[in-house]
């Protein structure tokens, strides 16, 4: 049996014909929408239900792929306006842009109806935990944009304490402001005896989607979401490897000295190698995180954005965090440029700047979810002189993870006292 889907891509790997009506059994088809079902490929004695509704008008969406906002933007807005947080939505852990663990209490009528028509007597309590929790429950959230097609928006949720998950897909229609919404749920049972009420369920979903996506403050959340991250790009570093402030463990390496930076504690610089952060190939997020850690700024930098991998010379960082650390970073990075020119000559040095558009890496074809936990990749080994390197197509381009610090940069930085 396959493992539970952890992302929007996993859902489509397990159910590639997700949006094909012929792959489902139709339980109800009415003016409000349609309810279809099929067996779940990853959970025994469970069903997948797809609720599909058309002509949902959503105002103020300039880019249809941003129909569903990121969980972190939603939580950030509610932290500023707690009086509007009726669903008690709180962010617990930000994994990467568009991927988070949050807790929520969902007092929506549609949730109550799902508990009635998609549960059995012996599993009603477990289903209630996911669809209509009595107390805030921990749920994984994942946003994916321009997937499964350009202009689409998808939002997957997965309960952590209980084995239930769901996904919502928004597809733009030809007419401006109109969307088709597909809500796919994994449920233990379909109460066929309640089929006469399925039209009411679909009508309730239509009303809920229309009101939720057009709440008076949604435009403000969407604006916050669009500007939530800054995309950083690095250029002009072909002369040699980038440099980072040196520490005691770098004493045996070749160092570049900038006496003018001694007062700031940035006199000694060392070449950055991906092996310093446990990688085999360069990623800007990893370089930048190490650089920031060595100037005593421990912040998160990411190599992914909304489930897509950025090219290695780009990374994402919270705009709020970036504005906070930018003065200190720029001051330190200007010395990196000086050290770079001294180490390699010439008048140019690597520059890090804000980009208007992210550029994504084309992913290799993923293994189906049921195999990813059963198979460990065997890396290709490339031997170059006395160095052993991993082949580049084996590199893990996942989002940057936070590393615990084992030393204080101010205490351990390798600086001559003279």
Image (cartoon, rainbow, N blue to C red):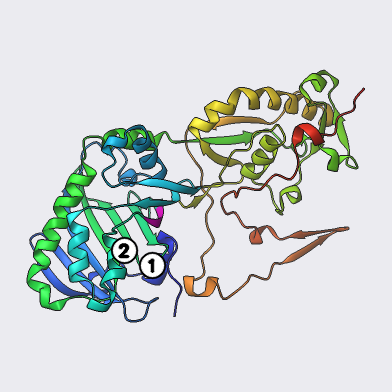
Which residues, given as a range, are shown in magenta?
137-142
- Dot 1 corresponds to which residue? 162
**Nearer-N-terminus badge (2/1):** 2
Q: Which mark is on residue 82?
A: none
Prevailing secondary structure of the magenta residues: strand
Q: Judging from the image, what secondary structure is the residue with disc 1 in? A: loop
Is 54 a magenta residue? Answer: no
**Circle 2: is it few (<14), some (14-19), or many (20+) Cα within 10 Å?**
some
- Dot 2 corresponds to which residue? 129
**Pointers 2 and 1 in contact (C-beta within 8 Å):** yes
Is 141 a magenta residue? Answer: yes
Q: Residue at x 55, y 72 (%)?
A: 373
Q: Residue at x 76, y 22 (%)?
A: 264
Q: Judging from the image, what secondary structure is the residue with disc 2 in? A: helix
Res 355 seen here: no
Q: Residue at x 51, y 66 (%)?
A: 366
Q: Nearer the viewer, residue 22 or 225?
A: 225
Outermost residue, front side: 135
- Is 238 located above or below residue 416 in the figure? below
- Is 67 located above or below residue 147 in the figure? above
Q: Position of residue 412 (x, y in %)?
A: 81, 36
Res 332 seen here: yes
Quarter the C terminus occupies:
top right
Q: Residue at x 78, y 26 (%)?
A: 266
Q: Position of residue 342 (x, y in %)?
A: 83, 26
Count of numbered badges drawn on the protein: 2
Quarter the N terminus occupies:
bottom left
Q: Nearer the viewer, residue 186 or 342?
A: 186
């Amino acid at each position: 049996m396959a493992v539970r889907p952890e992302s929007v891509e996993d859902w489509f790997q397990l159910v590639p014909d997700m949006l094909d009506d012929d792959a489902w059994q139709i339980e109800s088809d009415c003016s409000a929408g349609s309810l279809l079902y099929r067996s779940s490929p990853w959970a025994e004695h469970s069903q997948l239900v797809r609720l599909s509704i058309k002509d949902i008008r959503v105002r103020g969406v300039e880019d249809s792929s941003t129909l569903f906002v990121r969980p972190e933007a939603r939580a950030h807005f509610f932290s500023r306006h707690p009086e509007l947080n009726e669903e008690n939505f709180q962010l617990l852990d930000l994994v990467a842009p568009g991927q988070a663990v949050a807790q929520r209490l969902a007092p929506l009528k549609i949730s109550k109806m799902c508990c009635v028509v998609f549960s059995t007597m012996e599993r009603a309590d477990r289903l209630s935990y996911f669809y209509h929790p009595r107390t805030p429950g921990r749920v994984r959230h994942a946003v994916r944009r321009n997937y499964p097609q350009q202009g689409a928006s998808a939002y997957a949720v997965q309960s952590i304490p209980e084995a239930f998950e769901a996904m919502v897909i928004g597809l733009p229609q030809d007419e401006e402001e109109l969307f088709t919404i597909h809500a796919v749920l994994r449920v233990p049972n379909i109460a066929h005896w309640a089929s006469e009420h399925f039209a009411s369920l679909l009508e309730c979903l239509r009303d809920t989607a229309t009101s939720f996506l057009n709440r008076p403050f949604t435009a403000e959340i969407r604006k916050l979401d669009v500007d939530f991250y800054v995309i950083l790009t690095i250029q002009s570093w072909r002369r040699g490897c980038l440099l980072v402030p040196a520490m005691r463990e770098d004493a045996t390496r070749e160092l570049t000295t900038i006496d003018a930076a001694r007062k700031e504690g940035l006199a000694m610089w060392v070449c950055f190698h991906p092996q310093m952060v446990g990688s085999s190939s360069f990623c800007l997020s990893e370089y930048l995180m190490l650089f920031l850690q060595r100037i005593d700024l421990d912040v998160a930098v990411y190599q992914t954005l909304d489930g897509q991998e950025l090219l290695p010379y780009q990374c994402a960082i919270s705009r709020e965090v970036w504005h906070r650390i930018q003065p200190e970073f720029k001051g330190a990075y200007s010395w990196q440029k000086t050290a770079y020119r001294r180490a390699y000559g010439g008048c140019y040095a690597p520059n890090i700047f804000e980009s208007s558009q992210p550029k994504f890496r084309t992913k290799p074809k993923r293994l189906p979810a049921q195999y990813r936990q059963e198979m460990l990749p065997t890396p290709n080994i490339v031997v170059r002189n006395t160095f052993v390197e991993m082949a580049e197509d084996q590199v893990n381009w996942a989002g940057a993870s936070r590393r615990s610090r084992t030393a204080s940069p101010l205490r351990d930085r390798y600086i001559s006292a003279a």
